[in-house]
Each structure stands twice: as C-alpha cells, then as structure tokens.
Amino acid sequence: MPALVLLGAQWGDEGKGKATDLLGGSVDYVVRYQGGNNAGHTVVVGDQKYALHLLPSGILSPGCTPVIGNGVVVDPSVLLSELSGLNERGVDTSKLLISGNAHIITPYNVTVDKVTERFLGKRKIGTTGRGIGPTYADKINRVGIRVQDLYDESILTQKVEAALDVKNQILTKLYNRRAIAVEQVVEELLGYAAKIEPYVADTVLVLNQALEDDKVVLFEGGQGTLLDIDHGTYPFVTSSNPTAGGACTGAGVGPTKISRVIGILKAYTTRVGAGPFPTELFDEDGEALRRIGGERGVTTGRDRRCGWFDAVIARYATRVNGLTDFFLTKLDVLTGWEQIPVCVAYEIDGKRVEELPYSQTDFHHAKPVYEMLPGWSEDISKAKSFSDLPKNAQAYVKALEEMSGAPISAIGVGPGRDETIEINSFL
C-alpha cells in the first residue's frame, strides 16, 4: 500500500509540481485532492515548460493515471481549455479520471467571488476571483452542483434554482448587479456534460482498489499548509484543506493507507495575496529573490511576496502534517549571498517565541529572530549529489533540516526535471 502525500509546507508555490513530476515515472496514480484552478504548478521537462492550474502534475508522465478527486472544485471551461492546450503539445490526456462527486464552479460562483472581493475593499482577502470560495460555501450549504448532476437535467435545474434564489437577492439588492437567469446557467453547464463524460469515474473505488493491488498512489496538495482553512493564517487562507488530512477526505482513502507524507519547502519563503508574513523583505534582497527565483504566480500572474526562510513555519508544517520527509526546492536561487539570514524564532511583545502562535493577533505582530548562515558563490545547478554542493550550501541544508524537524530527502538545484539531488528515495 505505497500511498504518499505530497504538499506545500509554507504558503504554497514551493515547487510541488517539480516534486510530483520527479516521482511521476515511479507512480501509478497522481491525485489532486483539494482546491481548484486557484493553484498552479510549473513543470519543466527538457526545454518545455508546462503551467498546470487544475490538472494533476502526473498528467505529464506516461503510464501515470492523473485523478481529480472529490475534494476538488472543477471549472469545466478551465478543465477543457487546459486539456486542449496539452493535447496540442502532444501530451496524452486520455487517462484522466474525474470524481463524479467533485463540485462544479458555476458562472455565478465566479461572479459572487469577484463582486464580494471588490466590496470588501481594503479588507479583501486576496482571492484569485475564480469562484473557489463560493463553490466550497455552496458545498457546505448543500446547494452545490456536482459533476454527476450534469447528467440529470431535472436535478441540475432544481439545484441551480435553489442556489440562485439566494444569490440573485444578494447580487441585485446588495451589489446592484443583474440577476442571473437559471436557464442560461443550466444551458452552459449541460454544454460541458458530453465533453467531460469520458473522464468521469468513481474515483474512490478506483483508488482504493489500486492501493489494494499495491499500486503507488501519490496525493498532490495544492496551495500550502499555511493556507489551510483550519490550520493556516486565517482568514487569509484558501477554502479547503491542503494539509495531509485533506488527502483522506478529498480522495476517499483512510488514513491508515498513507505511508509517507512529504513536505515541499522553498529554500526561502514566499506568499501570494494578503496576510501576515514575518520574514517578508521590502529591500533589494527581496527584489533579488523575486527576480532570480522568477517569483510570479503560475495561476494569478501576481508577483509573490518574498522573504527569508522561516523555520518556525517549517516546524509547524512538520507537526500538523506528520511529515516524514522534506523536498527542499530552489536552493540555487540563494547562490551569491555572502550571508543568508534564517528565521529561527519570533519576538512578540518583547518575548522570544519558537513555535507558531495560535493567536491571530500575536502572529500579526511577530518579528523574526534571525540566525546568520554563511553563503556560497559557486554554481550548484550541475550538482548531482549532496557532496557536490559547496560546504556552506551543505551546512545551510543541514541547518534547515535540524530546525525543521524532518529529514531533507531531496534538493532542487534548478528548474529542470533532472536538476535535483536525491538523498533518500521517497519510494
């Protein structure tokens, strides 16, 4: 039962796509278990770069079955567009499976997301405006539209009517927008039914049977630990559970079937959107990290906020996910700094705090306590083993490992598929 969970250990954008793709040749199934097209993965294969937003990274690995689990929210237009783009580039997408229980992002979910965020003004959360939050809200309020509903027009119409009864009141009376016609939404959604039907499956059954047959299944989280709706920097979070527990509910497998949990860590820290970020830099170093690291959101197109590595967050991710390993990415970006600060604790109201404060107020006021580590100037992009790294780079990795609480089993030294040092096998 080799089931692995791979997730972001910071605020997302850590390089999960590269890690998933690295394992793709040895994995039978790659499963997205939460989020929607608000997540983005960049995968570099040879001289080809692929930007994936909704599809699992395993879709680029021949022989691997990519799965969109029940915990994902699906925008059919984005799905079909992404599939079309990959097909045009010669990628075989025919093995994709989509859970019939996954919820659909409807046109009115997107509308509500955008107008609500604008209405909030300076209090906005920093959502991607893609309807993710409203779709999850509909799911919890039991007025959501599921993939399987596309194949029963009567049920689909009833559910759209129920959802729009309330939403049209809000749109017209609160936001001064036009009401949305039920017939228009139903017609648009039915137009997707035949196109995605070949991919729809009982993915819970498929995945559990695969595990019983000793297939390797990789559960791929979107976003990151600190964006988890329950365990992140609320309210500046996503609307789902990217943490390891989300893999069980979002894919329909029991926790006893998970054998390994891998956290992806960037060698520094970034985040997109609003919210607290203790190590954020507003100087030349921050701009250099952004430029060298190519720190722009794959899905949002927004510049990422950049800061030094935060070991407090890494320890927290280890704890709430039960991490067994780390994959450290973008170590090469730090080449050239004479000294590299690492946040080892916070100062809050004059007191040193070494664990993530549970209080939102305290975290907003947290100031980083830095330890300076010696940097390196040598090019590390050609390194094939840990011993190939400069001594100071080795010391940096070992220090992060000790501070974070789990072994670093792989290191990214460049964007390419082959620019990775594997210290311990994940399988």
Image (spheres, grey):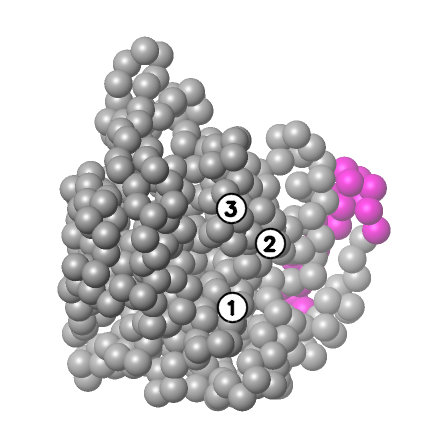
Quadrant where the N terminus lies?
Answer: bottom left
Which residue is at a point 32% across and 11% down the rendered structure image?
350
In the image, which residues are magenta?
A: 157-178
Q: Can you identify the residue that label 2 sits on? A: 300
The percent position of residue 178, horizontal first and vertical second, equals: 84, 51
**Residue 360, how many percent across, how many down?**
41, 26
Q: Which of the two labelled residues, at mark 2 and mark 1, occupies the earlier sequence position?
A: 1
- Looking at this view, is 300 or 295 the one in front? 295
Q: Secondary structure at mark 1?
A: strand
Q: Nearer the viewer, residue 165 or 254?
A: 254
The residue sitting at 34% across, 48% down in the picture is 377
Judged by its main secondary structure, the magenta piece is helix
- The spot of residue 175 in percent (x, y) is 78, 40
Name the quarter where the C terminus is drawn: bottom left
Disc marking residue 34: none
Whichever of callouts 3 and 1 sits on the residue coming sooner in the sequence is 1
Between marks 2 and 3 in the image, the one whose residue lies nearer the viewer: 3
Q: Position of residue 384 (x, y in %)?
A: 24, 67
Name the residue type under label 1: Leu
Residue at left 48%, top 32%? 281
Q: SS for tag 2?
A: loop
Q: Amino acid at mark 2?
A: Thr
Q: What residue would you read off at disc 1? A: 52
Verify CB contact (< 8 Å) between mark 2 and mark 1.
no
Name above or below for residue 31 compared with residue 245: below
Return the residue at label 3: 290
